[in-house]
Amino acid sequence: VQLQASGGGLVQAGGSLRLSCTASGRTFSSYHMGWFRQAPGKEREFVAAISWSGVKTYQSDSVQGRFAISRDNARNTVYLQMNSLKPEDTAVYYCAADPRGSTVGSTVVAYDYWGQGTEVTVSS
């Protein structure tokens, strides 16, 4: 599975961005998908995840109410809509895929495949 993330950029605080992650292969619809981020000098942290069906979604406390994850299985794509962005949201954002289809995870080790990352910078 190859994942290609896009949509990052520079935005002012309070603005919005939508990240996209497109997967290769025919089994995308069976994967749980997640978004993580890593700021300079910090560990990679969980942002949001979505079950293979799209029925269940999860967000970290730090983005709850501001970010939303969704997916389009027909397009092999998962999205992260980011609203009310803050300077502390500045990071490289990574999408990830869990092919095992069990519990939706919020840890790095729960995911087997990773995209290359897309950089988000929020200016104050």
Image (cartoon, rainbow, N blue to C red):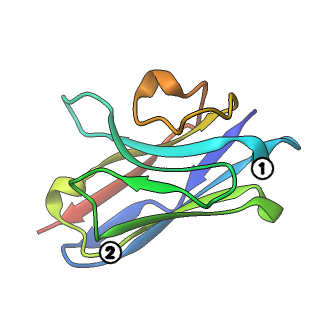
Residue, far top: 109
Give the residue displayed 11% in from the left and 69% down from the top: 124
On residue 83, the disc is 2
Q: Is residue 21 left or right of residue 72?
A: left
Report the amino acid beneath label 2: Asn
- Secondary structure of residue under mark 2: loop
Of residues 87 and 25, the one drawn nearer to the viewer in this rendering: 25
Identify the residue under disc 1. Answer: 29
Residue at 32% from the left image edge and 32% from the top image edge = 44
Left of 112 or right of it: where is 19? left
Residue 77 image offset from top left, x and y in percent? 69, 58
Mark closest to the chain's N terminus, 2 or 1: 1
Q: Are marks 2 and 1 in contact (CB under 8 Å)?
A: no
Find residue 110 and name its label: none
Local crowd size for mark 1, using a 10 Å CA cut-off: few (<14), some (14–19), many (≥20): many
Looking at the image, the residue that sits furthest to the right is: 26
Residue at image location 28% in from the left, 78% down from the top: 15
Residue 101: percent from left, percent from top: 68, 34
